């Protein structure tokens, strides 16, 4: 009964394949926007309006490395301040429509925690990078350039979708979801060679992508299983790169993996995992549970993407057979 109730929404999606699907598809695209995403969208729009009306407020809200001390709060506020109109439009749309896919799967609390942690860690890394570039080049523009924006978290959202449905193909772009973060980052790097403005966004995009992977790989806690992170091979750092580069990247990534995985494994050993008679977790239990968790999230996310017409859905009979097997 639990499985049947859980996947009632799948049957609803199948019913939409009839003659009224076109109208319902257009409506569903704008339905289901969560309250948290709407609230954060108001913050983004409000922050943009404030810096336009009061330009001097940018000094206190944006990340300006030379003034971060004593204005230490700007490592938090900078991520929610968009300086340009196109920036606030893209960030708001991305937050609303990607957020309505991820928040129901992660939960509102975890979704907000992800945004806060990724924004904070990204700003800290950008601050360190700017200070380092100043001492290397001795150019003061690295110290006084106001840096801000939500785009680091937007790239982090792509990493979250990659984790849940890596092999799902987008019907519009004809590419698998697992390549979205890599392609978006590669495109941003290429564009940065031609426009100076794009180059200023690049550190935020790079660190936003990497910090989101760090968080999901090692720090995110599953409230049901009490396990930390996602140790599966399908979410390894090398999966962001083409296959021929992985033999080179894996040895380098393993160094950082040992540094961070010690914390993850220690927490998992002390708080959960599948155990036998109160002993240590069974070998591979973390990977098994993370795979199951990802499969559950993938099904829920596929339903939402199918309802919005963004992915190519399977045949109704195949889906029904799969659901029947899972219910058994």
Image (cartoon, rainbow, N blue to C red):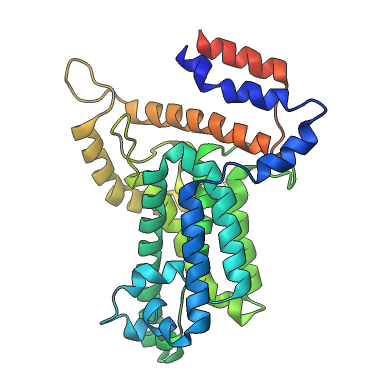
Q: Residue at x 31, y 29 (%)?
A: 225
Is residue 162 visible in the rendered image? The answer is: no
Q: Residue at x 43, y 87 (%)?
A: 56
Q: Residue at x 50, y 41 (%)?
A: 163
Q: Residue at x 47, y 11 (%)?
A: 1
**In this picture, is 55 found above or below 163?**
below
Q: For residue 22, which quarter of the picture?
A: top right
Residue nearer the viewer, 191 or 79:
79
Residue 251 in percent (x, y) is at 41, 50
**In this picture, is 214 found above or below 314?**
below
Residue 178 in percent (x, y) is at 58, 44
Q: For residue 90, which quarter of the picture?
A: bottom right
Is residue 36 visible in the rendered image? The answer is: yes
| 182 relative position to 125: left or right | right
Residue nearer the viewer, 11 or 327:
11
Residue 80 in percent (x, y) is at 45, 67
Residue nearer the viewer, 258 or 213:
213
**In this picture, is 211 found above or below 196?**
above
């Amino acid at each position: 009964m639990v499985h049947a109730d859980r996947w009632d929404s799948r049957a609803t999606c199948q019913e939409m394949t009839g003659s009224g699907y076109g109208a319902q598809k257009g409506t569903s695209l704008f339905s289901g926007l969560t309250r948290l995403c709407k609230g954060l969208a108001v913050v983004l729009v409000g922050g943009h309006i404030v810096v336009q009306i009061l330009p001097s407020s940018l000094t206190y809200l944006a990340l300006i490395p030379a003034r971060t001390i004593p204005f230490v709060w700007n490592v938090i506020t900078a991520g929610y301040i968009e300086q340009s109109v196109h920036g606030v439009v893209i960030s708001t749309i991305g937050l609303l429509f990607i957020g309505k896919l991820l928040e129901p799967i992660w939960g509102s609390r975890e979704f907000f925690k992800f945004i806060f942690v990724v924004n904070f860690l990204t700003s800290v890394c950008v601050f360190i990078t700017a200070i380092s570039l100043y001492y290397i080049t001795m150019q003061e523009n690295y110290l006084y350039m106001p840096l801000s924006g939500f785009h680091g978290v937007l790239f982090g959202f792509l990493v979250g979708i990659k984790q849940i449905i890596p092999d799902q193909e987008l019907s519009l772009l004809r590419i698998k979801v697992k390549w979205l973060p890599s392609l978006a980052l590669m495109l941003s790097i290429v564009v940065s060679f031609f426009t100076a403005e794009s180059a200023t966004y690049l550190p935020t995009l790079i660190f936003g992508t990497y910090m989101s992977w760090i968080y999901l790989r090692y720090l995110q806690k599953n409230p049901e299983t009490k396990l930390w992170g996602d140790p599966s091979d399908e979410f390894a750092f090398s999966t962001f790169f083409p296959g021929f580069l992985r033999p080179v990247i894996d040895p380098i990534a393993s160094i950082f993996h040992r540094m961070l995985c010690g914390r993850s494994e220690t927490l998992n050993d002390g708080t959960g995992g599948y155990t036998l008679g109160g002993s240590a977790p069974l070998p591979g239990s973390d990977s098994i549970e993370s795979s199951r968790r990802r499969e559950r999230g993938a099904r829920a996310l596929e339903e939402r993407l199918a309802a919005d017409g963004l992915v190519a859905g399977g045949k109704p009979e195949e889906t029904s057979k799969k659901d029947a097997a899972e219910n058994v």
